[in-house]
Image: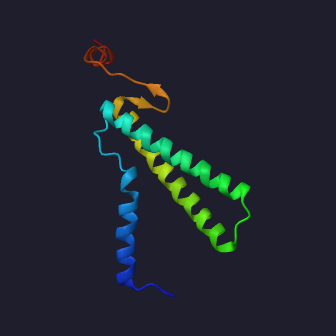
Amino acid sequence: MKKTFKNIELELLKEISDLEYYDVKAPLNSKEFWREWQEKFNRANLTLIALRNILRKNKLNRKDFRKVVNLIKSYEDIISYLNSLKATALNARGYYGGYYIEFEEDDEDESEGG
């Protein structure tokens, strides 16, 4: 059965509603952000592990197998989103590629030959 455009819009609203749990609402530079991020990241990772275990331990029919594989792909996307959010938050704090760079006003004066 093909979905009509109206049904796709409803499906999209449902998908967004389902994903809202993984939206980190706290400001990037707050301690609350990291607490909320860790909680959501851990839940997504544990769910992904559980889904992979279901595939390994159970002989699923074709329909259930496809459902689990699609859920795995969804959780991989969620984890990717959370990792990019983490990278953005770290960059905002001055961490770039594993290095912490802190700029002070005095450093700028010295680099100008002063």
Residue 48 point in image, percent of width and height: 57, 51
**Looking at the image, is 109 positioned above or below residue 66?**
above
Residue 14 location (% of width, % of height): 37, 68
Above-or-below relation of 18 to 8: above
58 to the left or right of 43: right
User: Which residue does the image show at 54% across and 53% down from the upper left?
Assistant: 76
Q: Quadrant of residue 105?
A: top left
Residue under the image location 47 percent in, 26 percent down: 99
Foreground pick, 51 / 24 = 51
Looking at the image, the residue that sits furthest to the front is 58
Horizontal side of 52 relative to 26 (left or right) equals: right
Q: Residue at x 35, y 76 (%)?
A: 9
Q: Residue at x 31, y 16 (%)?
A: 107
Residue 38's image quarter? top left
What is the quadrant of the C terminus in the image? top left
In the image, residue 92 above or below residue 2: above
Find residue 27 and report its horizontal and vertical position in percent. 28, 39
The furthest residue to the top: 114
Count up the numbered dots.
Answer: 0
Inspect this view and state whether residue 87 appears.
Answer: no
Camera-side residue: 62 or 16? 62
Residue 29 at what x, y percent from top left?
Answer: 30, 33
Kindly tell me whether residue 52 is visible in this rendering.
Answer: yes
Q: How is the image coloured?
A: rainbow
